[in-house]
Amino acid sequence: MLRCPSASVVKPGFARASFLARGIVGLSLLFLCAISVTAAEKTADSKPGAAPRTLLRLPRWIESLGERAARKPAEQPAASARKSSPRGPLATSPQAVASQPIAPKALDTQPSDESFLEPITTEETLETEQANEIDIASTPASSSEGKPGRALLRSRTAAELDAHTTLTSGWGDLVGETTGTTLGADSDSLDLSDEPTPAKPNLGPETSVLKREALERVSVQPEPTTAAASSSARSSDSKAFTPPEQATPEQIPQGKKSVPAIAEQISSIPVQAEHGSDSIPPIATPPEETPTLAIDPASFRGVYPGKTTREELESGWGAGEPFTRQDGEAGFFWEIEPFDRIEVTLDGDTVGSIRIKLAAPVAVSELSKQLEIADLRTVSILDEDGVSIGEVFPERGVIFSVNPGTQSATAVMLEPLDPESFVLRSEGEMSESVAFAIADLHYAIEIDPKHLRAHRLLLVLMCEQGRWQQASRLATAAETLDPLDIWTRLKHASVLMALNRLEDAREKVAGVKAQENISPLVTAQADRMLGRIALASTSPDYQKAVSHFEEAIRKATPLSSNRSTSIQKAARDVLLDAHLGTALAIARGTWQQKSRVIPKWIARSEAILSEVKSDDTDRDMMELQLCRGALAASAGSADSIDALPWVKRLLETRDRLGEHTSDPWRQRQIDWEIGEGLSDALVASQKRGDASDMLDNATLTAAYLERGATLRELTDAERRNVGDLLFRIGILHSLQKGDHATAVTWFDKAVPLWNNNPSFATQGELGRLGESFVSMAISYWQVERREDALAISRKGVDFMVEAVDQKQLDERSLAVAYGNLSTMYAEEGDSDQSKTYAEMASRAEATGTKLQ
């Protein structure tokens, strides 16, 4: 009979916190043994001469996960090569306790004698006045040539999405009054409402993963609702977005005689660019997937700005009359009916721009319809007083000059495609549609590979979306364009941290901090990052982390009252993260008085948030950060922080964010954050021995993570952790409910996340990985996917053998894996292979080697 790796021969303490962080409820050994006996009898009847079967057993660290009684689970066997773990057990001997440092006291916003920091001196306070904010340089209001299209934009607001059905379970009952759909702890399926609440587009998974049908549990990711977004009005082979109703344009002279004439003479030239599915309304619904842009530069009477030469122009139009504008720009003009005047400027020997002065003002909406560009997203040009003076259609290179403050077009300008117009439009739409903003920034960089601001803005969006490989390339390019820019270097370091390139990140941050004459804000940000790097290391240095956070708080505290709003905001962010980081370092480290000190650091973090105005647009995201920090501390020290109130607060914050978040990309970003917070809450619950509703809660957590991961580039650590959670859910279904068919659907999603994942070797977890594969193989065998079961078992054995070679796993653990393979081959009728593995199992069992 098949059996899982035996716990009786494996030393406890194996798994690190990232695996425990996905620990859930547990397993029923009695049920599993019943399956083993039944299968053994069946096998014995069919193969009387087969090798004797062994009982199916699980390692204690897996078995204890599913015990319904409230008790603390057994620890996973520890890899001896790793001396310390980010969330390792505390020393319990009197000598160890006596040597533990006292946890640092929580700080007030203003330093006091009671804090463990020294009071800030007057000299340090004076530095506040000289602090410089770190920000992305703004776009110039105008170019050196005075061309329009460089002023700060205002972009049209995107339409609201329909509400999403919210999946809640267990923890979801905490906020059942505010969520659209609630799943009780004892429910097996989700009642999805057909009529979502229109005023509240709640975040969260859109598909239940708790349905009884096995096939319905395979995926919780929503199907894309739209393909490419920005495209030409002339694309007829695709589905267009439905524009909302728009206000009636003001009553102005229509100039109808000139509109058809200009429409007949302005055309476009196709370029080598991918076209989307159809045109987009000016007020566009944020797309689910990355849109493409329909790039068709406009021309007038066969003349193309940036392409047509002066000789070609004069050959077609004849000689023009020279003119010079008040700003010094010169060119030639023609009087062509029915237009008042056609002006052409030259850029060297090539047409630079065409300005068509209309005989009478025309409504912008009417003119854009006649030119077949009404469906394009525009960007408005504002003067220094914030008054609209023009509308730009970036994909066409078309600009409407309007009477200030009106929608009356007086002239049409045609110019070569300008990257600045795409950057400006992306800035205006960034908060409403990340997808459109990313598409615009990509094309701006394609036009001008040296456009620094486009690189920086796209870098920010890639980091927010978790696309770390793309972010790394953008950060490298941006740093090449401006090697001295501090913001870019620190942002690059944060990307390296996400990719677990901690030494490279530390070197980059240390280089910034070592610069001369840097502001206190930069120092605070650098120390905060160094503290996070110390926490994330394979062998964390918790005291060093606390020291860096201490320095960050020291520098940021006086800046929180700076006259500059942007500096106040940056300092506030540093203070919140440094306080939460200190709480986490204490929770994970070995300190005295942890249960008394950690709540004070969390309370101090809450006090920082309380100083933020309720109408501040960043408040809810800071609340999300606070909840995640508190839950992370609870996962590190479950006895110090009760996770349940923070889970409720986390889900309430998600609901508030859902009220004003219509962009599906930002919704997925928030989903990921919620899932990460719930993952830490699972750890805390497991450490406290709370097994109530754990399967439902774990499934809810997986739903948020899977949906949040839809567009992310998961790092190796993220792939490992998400795979851990999916594996645990599958194990629970197979052993707690006897549902192997459902179990393998979860395993099918976990295995690809674990394949070719070097983080297991880096963290010394190959043995745990191998035992997990061996355990999964049992469910594959039970559902008659025997080839998969054999392949997964062999892969598990390979990992276990490597772990034994590296002295990370007891050699006797291989006896279970070899015994299972022997049983499988015997039932397949391969007696030779069965005998070989049976002999290997006997030798491994007899070895009795113990790790020291």
Image (cartoon, rainbow, N blue to C red):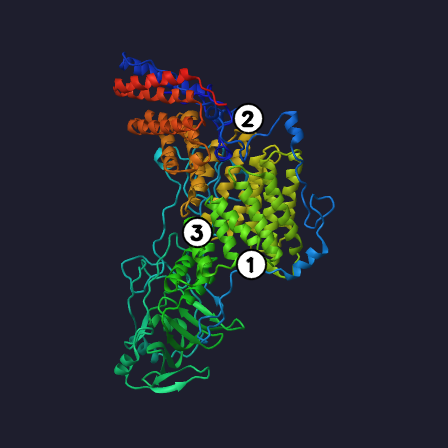
What residue is disc 3 on?
A: 472
Q: Which residue does the image show at 57% across and 53% down from the upper left? A: 514
Question: Around disc 1, counting alpha carbons within 10 Å, would you say few (fewer than 14), some (14 to 19), or many (20 or more)?
Answer: some
Q: Amino acid at mark 3?
A: Ser
Q: Is residue 273 left or right of residue 119?
A: left
Circle 1 SS class:
loop
- For marks 3 and 1, the one nearer the N-term is 1
The residue positioned farthest toward the top in the image shown: 48
Whether tag 2 and tag 3 are in contact, CB under 8 A, the answer is: no
* Residue 821 or residue 185, whichever sits in front: 821
* Residue 656 or residue 465, whichever sits in front: 465
Q: Which residue does the image show at 51% across and 27% down from the upper left? A: 13
Circle 2 SS class:
loop
The answer, for residue 179, to whether it is visible in the render is yes
Corner quadrant of residue 397: bottom left
- For marks 1 and 2, the one nearer the N-term is 2
Q: Which residue does the image show at 66% across and 31% down from the upper left? A: 99
Which numbered mark, 1 or 2, is in the foreground of this view? 1
Using the image, tell me which numbered label, if any, was put on residue 72: 2
Q: Residues under labels 3 and 1: Cα distance?
A: 20 Å
Q: Residues under labels 1 and 2: Cα distance?
A: 47 Å
Quarter placement of the N terminus:
top left
Using the image, tell me which numbered label, if any, was put on residue 134: 1
